[in-house]
Amino acid sequence: MSIKYIFITGGVVSSLGKGLTAASIAMLLENRGIKTALLKLDPYINVDPGTMNPFQHGEVYVTDDGAETDLDLGHYYRYTNSILSKKSNATTGQIYDTVIKKERKGDYLGETVQVIPHITDEIKKRILDCATQEKDIKVVFVEIGGTVGDIESLPFLEAIRQFRNERKKDCINIHLTYVPYLKAAGEIKTKPTQHSAQMLREIGIIPDVILCRCEKPLDDSFKEKISLFCNVNKDAVMDETDVENSIYEVPIGLYNQKLDQMICNMLNLKYEPIDLSRWEKMLDSLINPKKKVTIGIVGKYLSHQDAYKSIFEALSHGGAHLNTKIEIKRFESDKLLNDQNLLNEMKNLDGYLVPGGFGSRGLEGKIFAAKYARENKIPYFGICLGMHIMTIEFARNVLDLKDANSTEMEETQNPVISILEDQKQIEKLGGTMRLGAYHCSLNANSNAFKAYKKQVISERHRHRYEFNNKYKELMEKKGVLFSGTLKDDNLCEIMELKDHPWMLSVQFHPEFKSKPLSPHPLFIAFIEAALKHRQTK
């Protein structure tokens, strides 16, 4: 049987949740025994989001093979078991870069290189590459970033129009659109959806399903109106309402409207009975927890809700696993030391988490958090830069190396964190960090080993700077345990304090490998330590 393709477009406004929708539908099909793959097509000209400011784009999600990708791939990972790789994300920058390189090599045999067919052909090739990266893939979800009507999206929409025309029986389009409620008028408005669908039709794409993002379920009269004006069957106009408690409710809402069955029938897919009991049990634990902990996140991008997306999700996964509500307190690290109210609020927490980041802004606020956690025996979890913070704080205040710092921040006589040897000659910023999955060997007598319960682990990295081994012996004498090292190398990957209930930092990004049904072991261990601390207060 031929591979099927589901194209997901968005209309009216951005940030409607196309990635969540794609992941949710893929999760439902997986539970019906259908193997899926997912691809995000991003219209921006950046080659990848790796050099983008988190305030603009949110977090950068990293795959095992070292691709710096859009954060929607994090949704794909958390909801499904689909393979994610460099073939799961493509940008306008990548597409044009590839076509220009082919032209320079003479691959086009002197043709005039144009958007159609050369750019659109390359887009179609990326779709096919994603579809064939593993055996037995039955359905490929292709999410088009941006909004219908954006200039940047036009080549992608033209490419999927061509792709659909070449495989008429194997493709459907799901259009996610916004149906606003105007409070002043007391009315729901379908006109934006009508206009959005009309723009798609002008391009040559007629939606097969329209999903309506709305505050409350739509009455049949509104669905009939959208059906009539958008040339879509009424049964194929469905709600995607705002969820009350958790984004993990989205698949249940779509399942209750039988969207997964409709898609299978549209694409002539054989499917099995579905069992969502594990997902529903997880949701119940997430929504109705019996315990509670308060975790302080001390970071520099907290004003952007998606900058630490995977961190927040991984905490919620661990909380659901332990039937515990995770109350998160956000502390902007650059404001912390100048606000007594923030300092007072920060001192009554059950645990501290310092996430990754770049640059010196807010450094001292993070160091204060690590010092307070160490001196008061409060659980501390450092991730990437959070490990550098723990190292600098310990060197300054325990080893009495007052100028200890990272060479990322400044030149110093005591560079306890320094640039990786293979990074020293690199001038280009994009895609040049240590990226992707590496194996790490664990010390059997450590909190890390207690969490993972195995000797060798694999975790994803995104960094240029690492612990300076010149200070290793000195730190070990004062109570640091380097409990994880890069396999077959001596790079320090995990550090802990021996005389502390749970103070642990990692050089990698464990949040990228956490799922709601299989929470990351370090997040579980961190929350368990926070629960224990709360009980002893």
Image (cartoon, helix red, strand yellow):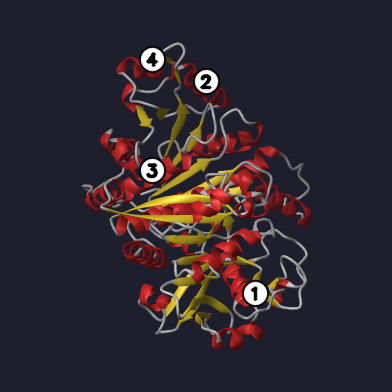
Callout 4–callout 1 Cβ contact below 8 Å = no
For the residues marked 3 and 4, what is the alpha-carbon distance in whole angstroms?
Answer: 28 Å
Observer-side mark, 3 or 1, equals 1
Q: Amino acid at mark 2?
A: Gln
Residue behind mark 2: 198
Mark 3 or mark 1, earlier in chain: 3
Name the side, left or right, on which 520 lies relative to 460: left
**Disc number at residue 225?**
4
| Residue lying at 34% horizontally and 56% vertically, measured from the top left | 319
Question: Which element carries disc 2, helix, strand or loop?
Answer: helix
**Alpha-carbon neighbours of circle 4 within 10 Å: few (<14), some, or many (≥20)?**
some
Q: Which residue is mark 3?
A: 247
Labels 2 & 3 near each other (Cβ < 8 A): no
Residue 139 in the image, given as x and y percentages of width and height: 40, 48
Relative to residue 16, is residue 178 depicted above or below? above
Instruction: Tell which of 118 and 387 is nearer to you.
Output: 387
Image location (x, y in percent) of residue 418: 69, 74
Q: Secondary structure at mark 1?
A: helix
Q: Label 1 is placed on what type of residue? A: Arg
Please report the residue visible at 42 percent of the width from the left and 57 percent of the height from the top.
314
Residue 112: x percent and y percent? Answer: 77, 41
Sequence-first tag of 3 and 4: 4
Q: Is residue 206 left or right of residue 277?
A: right
> The C terminus lies in which quarter of the figure?
bottom left
> Three-letter amino acid code at disc 4?
Lys
Question: How far is mark 2 from mark 3, CA to CA?
Answer: 30 Å
Q: CA distance from mark 2 to mark 4?
A: 14 Å
State the separation of the CA atoms marked 3 and 1.
Answer: 42 Å
* Residue holding disc 1: 396
Q: Disc 3 vs disc 1: Cβ atoms closer than 8 Å?
A: no
